[in-house]
Amino acid sequence: MIMGSAAQGVSCPDALVGRLVERGVQVIRFDHRDTGQSSVVDFDAHPYTIGDMARDCLAVLDGHGLGSAHVAGCSMGGMIAQWLGVHARDRVRSLTVMSSSPMGHDLRPVWARAKAGEPADPDDLPPPSPEFLAHLAAGLPPGVESDVALFRVFNGAVRPFDEPAARAMLELALSRATDPAAAANHDRAGWREAPDLLAPLSSITAPTSIVHGDQDPVFPLGHGEALAAAIPGAVLHIVSGMGHVMTSPGLPEEVADLIRL
């Protein structure tokens, strides 16, 4: 399981892990660099990219003595998973990309036009929701309360938001972080251009599933549809009422059942 930007392994719900274990697999969760109990990096001295974070995933597999694994990634973790599917095909048994967007697609112009209230370019992937952009513009101070507010936006308005579970996870993440501020480096890494991100997704050979909510405020459904169109044989699972995270009762189990094994 590869989690998203600034997210620790504990952001992968226990209920999802339990459901996957019931399906007969072992599950690896881990902290990205600059999150949780993993290494903290001086980004200015040693800037890194999504490709470097993907190589971290390979190091995790190596550390467990695994030649290959079923790979599932959420949000930025889904972009990392795509990188593995393209550049480390022999290590990927199957690929599940959740709540994500095609790697290497520069979304900065899309976000800039949306923030400025300008009309979208017809060729753009859809911009984030007004609610998500308003949260970013509010500039709330860092901390659990701000994170809970963000996850409420991530959840969307259709399915109920399990605030106690989200708060407990976010408090746990804060308590176990070596340097909570370092996670912001992921935003810098995510926007760094690199040639390896431009490799065609059509070169992915692993059996692939795309899992995407129809209420995603960060990467609206068009992003998942673009992924499914770009990866040969990919199956698109649209999850009704799902936003960008799995913070609604029963949703982690529902998503676990859609992960490709």
Image: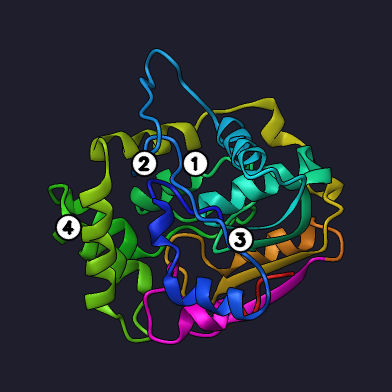
Q: Mark 3 packing: few (<14 Cα in 10 Å), some, or many (20+)?
A: many
C-alpha separation, residue under disc 1 versus residue under disc 3? 15 Å
| Earlier-in-chain disc, 2 versus 3 | 2
Q: Label 3 is placed on what type of residue?
A: His
Q: Which mark is residue 223?
A: 3
* Residue range corresponding to the magenta coloring: 234-256
Quick one: 122 or 44, which is closer to the camera?
A: 44
Residue 162, given in percent of the width and then of the height, sits at 29, 80
Quarter in which the N terminus is drawn: bottom right
**Residue at label 4?**
144
**Residue at label 1?**
109
| Earlier-in-chain disc, 2 versus 4 | 2
Q: Quadrant of residue 117?
A: bottom left
Quick one: 219 or 253, which is closer to the camera?
A: 253
Residue 211, given in percent of the width and then of the height, sits at 62, 71
Quick one: 219 or 244, which is closer to the camera?
A: 244
Q: Is residue 101 left or right of residue 199?
A: left
Residue drawn at (35%, 20%) of the image: 42
Q: Mark 2 packing: few (<14 Cα in 10 Å), some, or many (20+)?
A: many
Tag 3 secondary structure: helix
Q: Mark 4 packing: few (<14 Cα in 10 Å), some, or many (20+)?
A: some
Q: Nearer the viewer, mark 1 or mark 4?
A: 4
C-alpha separation, residue under disc 1 versus residue under disc 4? 30 Å
Residue 169 forms part of the magenta stretch: no
Number of marks in picture: 4
Tag 4 secondary structure: helix
| In the image, residue 220 above or below residue 64 | below
Q: Label 2 is placed on what type of residue?
A: Thr
